[in-house]
Image (spheres, grey):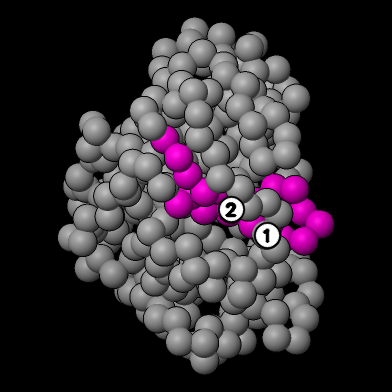
Amino acid sequence: MFSEIIHVGITVNNVEENLALYRDTLQLKVESDFEASGPAWEKVTGITGIKFRRITLQREGVDTGKVVLLKFLSPQSRPLPSDRKPYDLGLYDLGFESADIDKTYALLIQKGYTFDSSVQPVIVQGNTVAREASIQAPEGVHVMLVQVFYKPSAAQKEGELISSEMEHIVIVAKDREKSVRFYRDILSLKIILDNELEGDQLDRITRVPQAKLKVYLLGKEHVNAGKVEIIQYLTHEGRPLPDDTRLSDCGLRFLSFRVDDMDKAYNLLKSKGIGCISEPVTVALGRKNVKMVLGKDVDNIFIEFFQEM
């Protein structure tokens, strides 16, 4: 019934800074760019007087793992708290796969981007399964670049920074078991990885001293993009998202899943105790209409479900 993550939404203050990263540097293509407002959008989001610009970017020829930038014209967006910690709850970063992380790292440094650390190995049970480093992106977002060794990577063209669409999204959870039950048992994602991580390399990647994490990676079977990485810090307690968290607040805001039958999916969500802002509403999404509901997961993260009409 539910797909993999089709796209991740970022609420932004500065559109051009974000396009400079996702379009001009990470080489995603603009699929659509439009403004929207009106009663249908007010109903589906629960925001009175909403007006926004929505820009969708994607890997050319790929339908999943897209990045959506939302620029709210009304209401005014609140910035991400300046004292946010990596272990505070909510959406934390989005990841792209690189076929050559060292080359990608050097090219991004050349373009003036700041990394949280140098390229670090990810070691699981004594084996290096990946190497990764994250960029400090606009709006307080961190973009993780990953070269994985447990599966073949696509060949990378000269000058190309990434070799995939948006590969995964990281959620910092309060109760990993509750989060896993939501994404596995309700949204039908499969567990790909279940592990604990700690060590000097992890401390450098997370910028959290003596961090120890429980990590679950979930995805749609036979689909490489749009995975969910659920992490829980076993050594640090993070702050939850505020009860008044709004879609218009800056930062990583929502995940989006496509469904085959919106009414059936909505009834299932209700039966599982998943609250939605409204019943399914038909809205204009650029040149096409979709039936949509907006709900929240167990950590107060916005989840968009839509059916193309």
Identify the residue shown where x is 77% and y is 54%. 62
Identify the image quadrant of residue 4.
top right
Q: Secondary structure at mark 1?
A: strand
Q: Position of residue 81 (x, y in %)?
A: 22, 55
Residue denoted by label 1: 30
Residues marked 1 and 2 touching at CB (< 8 Å): yes
**What's under tag 2, amino acid-wise?**
Ile
Q: Position of residue 15 (x, y in %)?
A: 48, 63
Identify the residue shown where x is 64% and y is 77%. 161
For the image, the number of numbered tags is 2
Magenta: main secondary structure equals strand
Asked if 230 appears above or below 58 in the picture, the reply is above
Residue denoted by label 2: 55
Q: Position of residue 104 (x, y in %)?
A: 59, 82
**Quadrant in which the N terminus appears:** top right
Q: Secondary structure at mark 2?
A: strand
216 with respect to 223 (left or right): left
Does the magenta portion include 69? Answer: yes
Q: Nearer the viewer, residue 259 or 24?
A: 24
Residue 241 visible, this angle: yes
Does the magenta portion include 263? Answer: no
Q: Nearer the viewer, residue 140 or 95?
A: 140
Identify the image quadrant of residue 198.
bottom left
Q: Residues within 10 Å of mark 1 (few under 14, many from 20)?
A: some
Q: Position of residue 64 (x, y in %)?
A: 70, 48
Asked if 120 appears above or below 277 in the picture, the reply is below
**What's under tag 1, amino acid-wise?**
Val
Q: CA distance from mark 1 to mark 2?
A: 7 Å
